[in-house]
Structures are given as structure tokens and as C-alpha cells.
Image: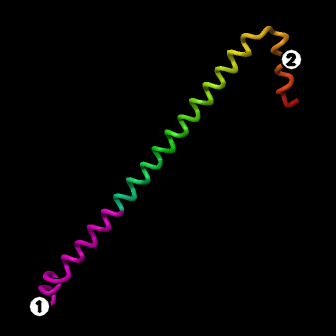
Amino acid sequence: MTVLLAAFLEHIAPYALAAGAGLVALLGWGFHQRLAGAKAERNKQAAEEAKAKSVADQVENDVGALPGGLAKEGLKKWSRG
């Protein structure tokens, strides 16, 4: 039994440890990639929200600059009712 254990530790264990280390490295890399993708998506959504807010602010400024009657007429074209 001792001979088998010694043979295992001498010949097979280094390969098993290397395979285990490789597996841990792959899992770590995959987790890193997942977090990087999530961060990129959050940044993309934040940029789109900022652009939409900019457009909304510009529309609000334009509508605020119109006289009351003209603004109501223009809004009637865009209403769904």
C-alpha cells in the first residue's frame, strides 16, 4: 500500500495538482469576464440614459419657449388620444 501511495505522490500528484490549478485559473478568468461584461453593460445603459435625458431636457426647453397656444397645438399632433 505504501508503494502505491509513494508512486502516486511521485508520478501522478504533480499532474493532478497542475490540472487542479488550471481549473481554478479557468474559473477565475470566467468570473472576471462575467464581471467585466456586467460593468460594460451598466456603462452602456448609463450612457443611453444620459443621452435620453439630454434629449428630454432639450424638448422641455423648446416647449417652454413656445407661447401657450402654440405649444398646445403642437402637442395635439403628438398625443395618442
18 over 58 or under it: above or below: below
Q: Disc 1 versus disc 2: distance between alpha carbons?
A: 95 Å
Q: Residue at x 50, y 41 (%)?
A: 42
Q: Residues within 10 Å of mark 1 (few under 14, many from 20)?
A: few
Q: Please tell me which residue is depicted at 11% across the width and 90% down the height of the picture.
A: 3
Is 16 a magenta residue? yes
7 or 74, which is in the foreground?
74
State the extent of the magenta-drawn residues as a range: 1-26
Which of the marked residues, 1 or 2, is nearer the chain's N terminus?
A: 1
Q: Is residue 28 above or below residue 51?
A: below
The spot of residue 2 in percent (x, y) is 11, 89
- As helix, strand or loop, the secondary structure at mark 2 comes to helix
Look at 32% across and 68% down and name the residue there.
23
Q: Is residue 9 left or right of residue 58?
A: left
Residue at image mark 2: 73
Up the image or down, 16 lies above or below 3; here it is: above
Q: Which residue is mark 1?
A: 3
The N terminus: image quadrant: bottom left
Q: Is residue 54 left or right of residue 62?
A: left
The tag on residue 34 is none
Question: Is residue 25 covered in magenta?
Answer: yes
